[in-house]
Image (tube, rainbow, N blue to C red):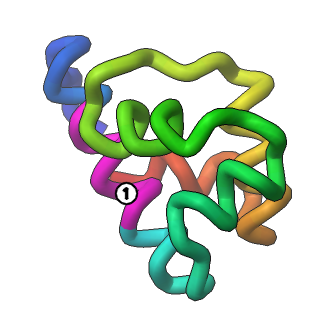
Amino acid sequence: MEYLSEKKFLIAFGQNLRRLRKSRGFTQEELANEINIEISQISRIERGVINTSISNANLIAKALQFPVSELFQF
C-alpha cells in the first residue's frame, strides 16, 4: 500500500467502510445501533471527517462480519 496523507487515508478508509457496510445491507443507522454509537459518528467516519479508534474499527468489523484487516484494504 502506498503512503497516503492522513486526510487521504481517512477518506479512503471511510469510502471502504461505506462499500463494506452497503455490501452487507446495513444502513448507517443499523450499524450505529449494532455497535452502540451515534449514527453521526458512522457518517463522520465514512466521510473521513474523524479518525475512529481501533476499538471502534474492531466493533465495526465484527458487526459487518469481516476481518478487521478488510477495513484497511483500499
Q: Residue shown at 76%/53% (left/top)?
A: 33
Which span is picked out in magenta?
11-18
- Dot 1: few (<14), some (14–19), or many (≥20) neighbours within 10 Å? some
Q: Residue shown at 82%/40% (left/top)?
A: 36
Residue 50 in which image quadrant: top left
Decide if residue 59 is on the left or right side of residue 44. right
Above or below, 64 against 46 in this view is below
Q: Position of residue 64 (x, y in %)?
A: 72, 67
- State the residue position of label 1: 16
Decide if residue 69 is on the left or right side of residue 72. right
Above or below, 43 against 15 in this view is above
Q: Amino acid at mark 1?
A: Asn
**Foreground residue among 9 and 14:** 14
Above or below, 45 against 33 in this view is above
Decide if residue 40 is on the left or right side of residue 56. left
Q: Is residue 14 magenta?
A: yes
Q: Is residue 30 magenta?
A: no
**Foreground residue among 67 and 57:** 57
Above or below, 13 against 24 in this view is above
User: Total marks drawn?
Assistant: 1
Q: Residue shown at 44%/17% (left/top)?
A: 51
Decide if residue 63 is on the left or right side of residue 7. right
**Foreground residue among 55 and 43:** 43
Q: Position of residue 23 (x, y in %)?
A: 50, 84
Q: Residue shown at 18%/18% (left/top)?
A: 7
Q: Position of residue 1 (x, y in %)?
A: 30, 39
In terms of secondary structure, what is the magenta stretch mainly?
helix
- Dot 1: element: helix
Q: Position of residue 57 (x, y in %)?
A: 67, 36
